[in-house]
Amino acid sequence: MSWGLDGVSVERGAVTVLGAVTLEVTKGEIVAVVGGDGAGKSTLLAALAGLIRPSSGTIRRPERSRIGFLPASSGVYPDLTVSENLRFAASVYGLPERIAADRIRTLLERTGLAGAADRLGGRLSGGMRQKLGVARAMLHQPDLLILDEPTTGVDPVSRSDLWWLLTREVARGCAVVLSTTYLDEADRAGHVVVLRSGRVLTEGTPAAITAAVPGTLRTVAFRPAAPFAWRRGRTWRAWSADGGPDGDRVEPDLQDAVVLATLRAEGRP
Amino acid sequence: MTELLARCAAVSHRYGTHTVLDVVNLEVPTGEVVGLLGANGAGKTTLIRILLGLLAPSSGSVSLLGAAPSRRARSRIGYVPQSLGLYEDLTAAENLDFTAAAFGGRTASLPAALAVPPGVLAGRLPLGLQRRLAFATAFAHSPRLYVLDEPTSGVDPLARTRLWDVIRDVADNGAGVLVTTHSMEEAEECDRLVMLAAGRVVADGTVAGIVGHSQVVTVTGDDWPGALSALERAGLRPSLVGRSLRVPGTDLAAARIALSGTGARARLAPATLEERFVELTAS
């Protein structure tokens, strides 16, 4: 089964928040939506979840009870404890008591939150709050899991736990779409959609996106005069549409590909 | 000439019987961007507070700009918290003026990369420009040491490389930079990383030096969900990358035993910085 958006636009007044975006989310796959603040990631995910009505285009999604959604704010109730947050969600989803208790116990253990089960949601660290939000979104074993920046502000150890949890969901046949600002994280997804100002800048498997980079990319030790250049650590990347004489040729990674695509979309460095 | 702008020597800190920092050494010299990494609760915030002189360590010594941390030394530090510390109902220009006044009126002219629309309320700026403004307010009083918390979090990849360009420039011009971050992309921009786990330094070096030749088991096969179950039965927590699994916390032999009969193939691949971090934190 596949879900997604077909030519979806969202307008707010004269502003196009999302412009004719098409996105395919397939069962057993993770799709990563990448972009900075204001790129339209949250709008795209909320539209897919049915929380925003698009101005045009069509949306394919399962019925609401088969969707799991993590909003960017994590949606954790600060005045409920960790286990109360999960029990409340279970009752909203209408899970039978015994199944709910079983799943909550397992999820608490897998997220490493078992020791914090009685702590208030408002007293969790950023990483714990995100893990609780994700656990809550997957509690009813949805067909489509929509996660808005599940790992932002999450430390690498918790991020690794979260990816294991997502992997299990995908293995069970769930379709997962998540947004992230981390390109190294997007690099793990089966399909990446890069948004800029509400439009798709580039998309594909990470390998396809980097393979499609045209021209020549070089790494150079000093700030290049080339118009399409950017810094990476102590060195620079310099791109030219054709070959170039100096420096070492380098294979672009996802970060290079997205930076270059953004520069070319701007039409100037 | 290189000098140490910040130095923690054998710093330990205890709250009651709980040891938050255990004999930690940290040095930030001029011209260097040092990344401080650690899981939540590893002690990063406590270490920064001690470094700035906002908290006295239980033992060990601290120097900031060559002396014990003081209010005077702190005035030569550019600190940008993750919350940015901007006055949202002041304009960008007013934020710059206010901070300049608070720091005694010294103002450096801002490079083009730090330009922000002056008349717009800081709270109305998009996050990328807010980050730029926060960095500009720190930059304007020409600090010798910058302390930056996830300086490019949430901004798009191009804006991120532009901000890092400015950060690298201040280091090239002789400032020291201490960055705390959970982002491996930011960590890879640093000259040197110090990794904290449970209050101890578990690694100190360049990205290449820390990752070294460490490897991680990767598993491929037509039935990766079947391989996942087999690995989980062995107590492992694999994660999906594309159509293959990466399996931290095991070696090739153990992974192959766990996978026997599944038809999946296990091999070794170079570990990422994040995988190395998780490994060092777990051990």
Image (cartoon, grey):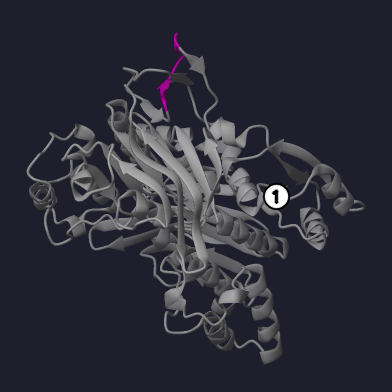
**Which chain hosts label 1?**
B
- Where residue B219 appears, as percent x and y from the top left, is 77, 46
In the image, residue B167 above or below residue B72: above
Would you say residue B190 is visible in this rendering? yes
A239 sits to left or right of B212: left
The amino acid type found where label 1 is placed reads Pro
Which quarter shows the N terminus of chain B? Answer: top left
Would you say residue B156 is visible in this rendering? no
Residue placed furthest toward the bottom: A97
In the image, residue A43 above or below residue A264: below
Span shown in magenta: A234-246
As for residue B245 lying within the magenta part, the answer is no
Residue placed furthest toward the right: B261
Q: Residues within 10 Å of mark 1 (few under 14, many from 20)?
A: many
In the image, residue B62 above or below residue A85: above
Q: According to the image, label 1 marks what residue?
A: B248
Who's the residue at 45% across and 68% down the image?
A71
Q: Nearer the viewer, residue A255 or A158?
A: A158
Location of residue A57 by image quarter: bottom left
- Where residue B255 appears, as percent x and y from the top left, is 82, 49
Q: Secondary structure at mark 1?
A: loop
